[in-house]
Image (cartoon, rainbow, N blue to C red):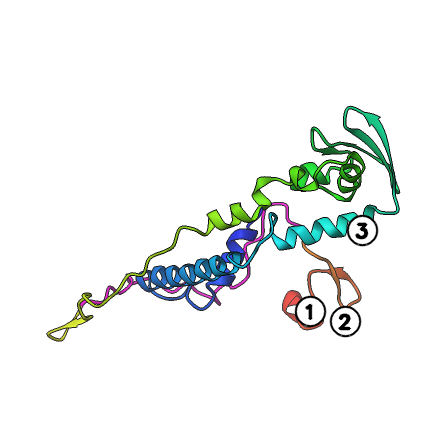
Amino acid sequence: MWSNVAEYFNSWIREERHLPITKLINSVRIKLMRKIAKRRELVNKWNGLICPKMESKLHDGFNTSRPWIVSSSGNDVYEVHSHPSVSVDISRRICSCGEWQLKAFPCAHAVGAIQKSGYDLSLFVDQYFYVQSYRESYSFPIYPIPSIWKPDCNVDGDSEVVIPHLSKKQPGRPNKKRIRLNGEKVRQITCSRCGKVGNHNKKSYYVNTV
C-alpha cells in the first residue's frame, strides 16, 4: 500500500491545510470548483475521439513499432519481432510484455499488431480514455455557497468563532518528517567525515555520536 494519493492531496492544499476546519472545507470546495470548471472548458475544445494526450501516445507507439516485423498466427494472435519478440492477442487484449493488461492501453507491440490486422486502432482503446468519458467526469459542477445571508462572526461583541480545544504541547521538537511505510527502504548515504555508509552525513555525525 502507498500513500502517494494522500501526499499529493496534502501538497495540493499546502496553504489551506493549517486553517480551521470550516475554512479548510470551504477552501477545498473553491479549489475543486475552479479545477472542474477549468477542465470542463478544456474538454469542450477537444474534437477527437480519444483524449489528446493518449492519442499522442498512440502515435508514439506507432512510430516505435514501424521497424518491427509482425507475423500472424491466426485467430487474432500475432508475434511481434521486436527485441525481445512478444506475442499479442488483440481479441483478448493481451501482450506478453504485460503493459497492455497493466495500463488498459495498447502498448507499442499491440499497436503494431493492430495495424497489421487492419482493425481500427481506436476500437482497442478503453472507454476510459475517450473524450466523452472525460467530458462526463467533469459534467457535474460544484455549486457556489454564497455567504450573503451568513451572520457576522461577532454579534454584539460576543465571538462566535469556534476555537480548538486546549492541548498539551509535547516535549521536544515537532516531527515534520513523513511517517514511513512498513518495510520501506531508506536510501543509504556515505558520510564524508567518517567514511561509513548509513543514514547520517557530515552535519548529523556529531548528533548521532553524542
Residue placed at 58% from the left, 52% from the top? Answer: 180
Q: Nearer the viewer, residue 1 or 108?
A: 108
- Contact? badges 1 and 2 (CB < 8 Å): yes
Check residue 166 for magenta coloring.
Answer: yes
Q: Main secondary structure of the magenta part?
A: loop
How far across and down, in percent of the image, does residue 208 sit?
Answer: 65, 65
Which residue is the site of mark 3? Answer: 63
Drawn side of residue 25 relative to residue 81, left or right: left
Which residue is the site of mark 2? Answer: 193
**Mark before the other along the chain sequence, 3 or 1:** 3
Residue placed at 78% from the left, 62% from the top? Answer: 196
- Tally the numbered discs: 3
Residue placed at 35% from the left, 59% from the top? Answer: 25
Drawn side of residue 175 relative to residue 70, left or right: left
What number is the disc on residue 7?
none
**Mark before the other along the chain sequence, 2 or 3:** 3
Q: Quadrant where the N terminus lies?
A: top right
How far across and down, in percent of the image, does residue 54 sit?
Answer: 65, 50
Amino acid type assigned to the residue bearing label 1 in the image: Tyr
Which residue is the site of mark 1? Answer: 205
Q: CA distance from mark 2 to mark 3?
A: 51 Å
Amino acid type assigned to the residue bearing label 3 in the image: Asn
